[in-house]
């Protein structure tokens, strides 16, 4: 090969190498930018998930308190009903015992 061709090819290879390096540099910059942006998006998403979790925990706690109050209310109502029923049955039993006594006392021997 003659010297001029070698020099021409070297220049062309150098130009191509320079272009490739510039493209690589831009690509690396773009990749770094995408990484930074992705990191920001991930942090924002973490923050939003944390907010949702805290909101859900607050909701569950409030709901538990409401449910517990309702359970206590129903328990108290049931106790009142049982107590009333028991007192009524006790009165009936007392009345029946008294009637039996009266009948036994008034029964001819």
Image (cartoon, grey):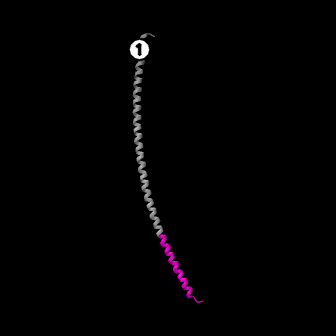
Vertical comparison of 35 with 9: above or below: below
Q: Position of residue 35 (x, y in %)?
A: 42, 34
Q: Position of residue 9 (x, y in %)?
A: 43, 15
Q: Residues within 10 Å of mark 1 (few under 14, many from 20)?
A: few
Q: Main secondary structure of the magenta part?
A: helix
Residue 94 is covered by the magenta coloring: yes
Residue 34 is covered by the magenta coloring: no
- Magenta residues span 81-109
Quarter where residue 33 is shown: top left
**Number of numbered tags placed on the structure image:** 1
Farthest-out residue, top: 2
Q: Residue at x 49, y 75 (%)?
A: 88
Q: Residue at x 40, y 27 (%)?
A: 25
Q: Position of residue 66 (x, y in %)?
A: 43, 59
Quadrant location of the C terminus? bottom right
The one of 77 and 10 positioned closer to us in this rendering: 77
Q: Is residue 30 left or right of residue 91?
A: left
Which SS class for mark 1? helix
The one of 95 and 41 positioned closer to us in this rendering: 95
The one of 8 and 92 positioned closer to us in this rendering: 92
Farthest-out residue, bottom: 108
Q: Residue at x 41, y 48 (%)?
A: 52
Q: Position of residue 104 (x, y in %)?
A: 57, 85
Vertical comparison of 32 with 55: above or below: above
Residue bearing the label numbered 1? 8
Farthest-out residue, right: 109
Q: Residue at x 48, y 68 (%)?
A: 79
Vertical comparison of 8 with 62: above or below: above
């Amino acid at each position: 090969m003659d010297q001029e061709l070698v020099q021409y090819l070297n220049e062309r290879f150098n130009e191509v190498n320079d272009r490739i390096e510039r493209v690589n540099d831009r690509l690396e910059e773009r990749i770094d930018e995408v990484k930074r942006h992705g990191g920001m998006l991930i942090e924002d998403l973490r923050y939003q998930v944390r907010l949702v979790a805290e909101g859900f925990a607050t909701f569950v706690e409030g709901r538990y308190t409401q449910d517990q109050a309702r359970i206590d209310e129903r328990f108290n109502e049931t106790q009142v009903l049982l107590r009333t029923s028991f007192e009524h049955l006790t009165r009936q039993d007392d009345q029946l015992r008294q009637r039996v006594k009266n009948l036994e006392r008034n029964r001819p021997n």
